[in-house]
Amino acid sequence: MYLIVGLGNPTKNYSHTRHNVGFDMLDAVADACRVSVDTRKHKALIGKGVIGGQKVILAKPQTYMNLSGESVREIRDFYKIEPEHILIIYDDISLDVGQLRIRAKGSAGGHNGIKNIIAHLGTTEFPRIKVGIGGKPEGWDLADYVLSRYSAAEREALREAAGQVAQAVEMIVDGDIAGAMNRFNGKKKAKEQS
């Protein structure tokens, strides 16, 4: 069994902001495998389904980003899921909008949601898909930037990324994280011509 978690903040105020790209990408995965993520359980909205013959739980923690680990740990403990079968999808400001970076493990890299998950799981050995939200413009406060919304061109890049994330999740659940990394890591999105 796999647990696939998209990180974000609950409530409509945060809907479709940069920091909530994990929720948006999880919705794309849910659509691709026809799973409704609407059951309130383990401090999250969850849905159960099958991807590539493997049972999966899709989850959107409702704890707010900085406490995401509380929900992830509860689900892990309840279903006895090994860390290498816990896949986290979240935002990364060091990547261009819509660019993916898949890793089998790693540090938090300054991301508070991941820091909290590492603290609750007691390990950094879980796979993740980072989704680029673009770098903070000069003069912007980081908190304001990650809670801002996308331009039309950026939304288009994210639509393309959503399809790639759904494919990457299928490959990872199928045991081919190396293939997913080779296929999707480092693909630059076309920037607007100036």
Image: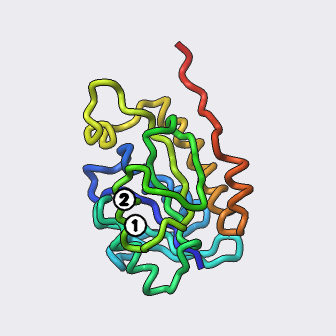
Q: Is residue 182 left or right of residue 89?
A: right
Residue 155: % across, % down: 48, 37
Which quadrant of the figure contains the N terminus? bottom right
Q: Nearer the viewer, residue 192 or 91?
A: 91
Q: Which mark is residue 113?
A: 2
The image quarter in which residue 65 lies: bottom left
Q: Nearer the viewer, residue 9 or 151?
A: 9
Q: Amino acid at mark 2?
A: Gly
The image quarter in which residue 64 lies: bottom left
Q: Is the Cβ of the residue at disc 2 closer than 8 Å to that at disc 1? A: yes
Label 2 to label 1, Cα distance in Å? 6 Å
Q: Is residue 183 above or below residue 133?
A: below
Q: Is residue 85 left or right of residue 91?
A: right
Q: Secondary structure at mark 1?
A: helix
Q: Which mark is residue 117?
A: 1
Residue 41: % across, % down: 36, 79
